[in-house]
Amino acid sequence: MMKKATIQSILVRACACVLLLCAVSANALAYNAQTAADWLQQFAKALQGFVPVNDPAMTADPARAGQRLLEYEFGTVLVRGEGVQMSDILEIDIRSPQVKDCRNVCVGMPLEETLESRLPEYSASPLYVLGTQEAGYGWSWAYLSENGVYGVEYIAYGGEGASMKEYTLTYVIESGVITAIRMKIADALLAQAQEGLETAEEIASRQDSEVLIAKNNAPMLTQENMLVMGGEALGVPVAQLVARLGEPQSVQTLPQGTGRVLVYDGAVVTLGFNEYTGEELVRALSVNSAAIEGPNRLKVGMDVGTAGSLFRADSDLYARGGTLYLEGEALGEAPYGELMALDQGELMLRYACLLENGDTAMLQAVIQDDVITYWHLMYADDVQGGV
């Protein structure tokens, strides 16, 4: 008679083969509720031949009444009650290439080999819709950060009325490789499925609009190219700037004697005082005239594509906005550049530049109907409301 351990070993290997053969295609399969349910049924059948590696008497999850977390060599399975039937399974977490999911995908595969559509390089939104089902309710989307895709999720709904289920398949990504596969099964409502699909379709309709700023290798904004009419502006004595712009039309005093404002036809220059020397210095410029050339020859009236090409762009950017480049430790810390979506259809090109004295200078160019309507140059400390 074969030893019990040997019989169990053969049974485990046989069950593993069943799990591996649940999907027979050589390529990743399309995902829908029926595909998920069929695979889940086979998975539950194979699981009955496996023995958890944790103590069966200690598998109750104290955080979830009536549920048990079963640990296996390939990962974990969360079930309700005492069974491991298909209807008992709530969540599956696969950490080993031993098991293929319902799309014929396993841990260790490069993400690009598993997708049915192109992989986004960047998205201003943390969600990028990869596709939606042609029939029924279902979609897939990618989760993105500054370092790229860190997760992909497939969601599909099956059944009707009180029997409707939501099947969620998630890939955890590290350095472009799948490190974990998770499936979750939950009760669902038709309204929930409809609302989710509408959200996915709305995101998809906005994410692939016309490219406004194309990826380029132009230099980022630095103190050397942050010039106005060919010369330095921020922090210089007022006489230097007036020599280039000419005499102002009027001069106004700021409240409480904090400085003065020079008003030109198409520009406003804000002045402040050096608290140590009393010298009057330029603190900010606001320009809405095409006659005044700003940093890197930026001008009012330029289209957004031309204006964006004056400074570095690490990826194509769309109307939804996004990061142009990021050299600081975080977005908002110099040096960096971004395209921001504002209210009422406006956009803003915003750059932060680190000056030699340790201050941060900001260049903001507001865009309406794809054209620069005005631009601001100022110290970051003077930016109102972070914009």
Image: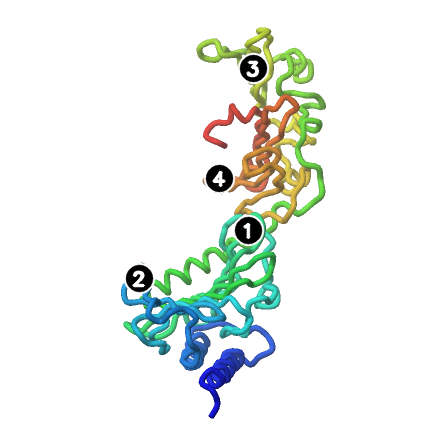
Q: Is residue 34 visible?
A: no
Are dots 2 and 1 in contact, CB under 8 Å?
Answer: no
x 60%, y 16%: residue: 282
- Position of residue 380 relative to residue 196, above or below, is above
**Mark 2, secondary structure of its residue:** loop
- Position of residue 216 relative to residue 296, above or below, is below
Cα distance, mark 2 to mark 1?
Answer: 36 Å
**Mark 1, secondary structure of its residue:** loop
**Nearest to N terminus: mark 3 or mark 4:** 3
Position of 102 with respect to 269 (left or right) is left
Cα distance, mark 2 to mark 4?
Answer: 43 Å
**Nearest to N terminus: mark 2 or mark 1:** 2
> Residue 123's mark?
1
Instruction: Please give the residue where the numbered disc 3 appears in the rendered image.
Output: 271
Cα distance, mark 3 to mark 4?
Answer: 28 Å
**Amino acid type indicated by mark 3:** Leu
Instruction: Please give the residue where the numbered disc 2 appears in the rendered image.
Output: 64
**Amino acid type indicated by mark 2:** Arg
Which numbered mark, 2 or 1, is in the foreground of this view?
2
